[in-house]
Amino acid sequence: MTAAALTAAQAGLVTCTSCGLLSRPADPAAPGYCPRCGTALTRRRPHATQYTWALIVAASIWYLPANLLPVLTTRTPRISDSHTIIGGVVSLYTSGQWALAPIVLLASVTVPIGTLVVLTYLLVTVQRNSPQLRRERPLLYRLIRAIGRWSMLDVFVATFTVALVQLPLPGC
């Protein structure tokens, strides 16, 4: 039987919410301020689990309208065309943008669903104090945090698409 891993909180360590520095406060009763950036240190964010559940429920509710309602309308002198995210992916694919279509699909559809699933799994296992995958949970969290940075890629694609449609081409 293996011994349970000691957590940072059990070791008396606190993490700065601003810069991420892990430090041992001089007074355990009052953590004080971060030695690197000066932000007030707290042991745990109060009600963090409840806030996270509320955000997951809200994101799940808004996920459907975000994907079912049109997000991009292109107007030319002859045509006005509205696209949902999936419609935009299909339009990109059929217009020959085979490399761009999967990027938009991944960033706009797959990453948000994956993030919601992983966050839900992490919250359930933390609330149940499940010993399974105790070492993998921080890795999963870091993974969705790293992937989340790339989920705004579709906004840049939409911006460039709008610019291409609205800017006149030279010689036209």
Image: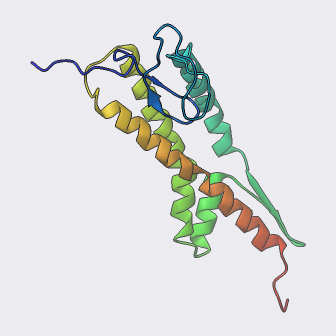
Quarter the N terminus occupies: top left
Q: Can you say whether 42 is above or below 83 in the image?
A: above
Q: Quick one: 116 or 131, which is closer to the camera? A: 131
What residue sits 48% from the left and 11% below the top? Answer: 27
Q: Position of residue 112 (x, y in %)?
A: 54, 42
* Image colouring: rainbow
Q: Can you tell which quarter of the image residue 127 is in?
A: top left
Q: Can you tell which quarter of the image residue 54 is in?
A: top right
Would you say 41 lies left or right of 62 here?
left
Q: Check the image and name the residue furthest to the bottom.
A: 171
What residue sits 34% from the left and 17% below the top? Answer: 11
Q: Check the image and name the residue furthest to the front.
A: 26
Q: Quick one: 64 or 106, which is closer to the camera? A: 106
What residue sits 35% from the left and 13% below the top? Answer: 128
What residue sits 59% from the left and 19% below the top? Answer: 51
Q: Can you say whether 158 is above or below 139 in the image?
A: below
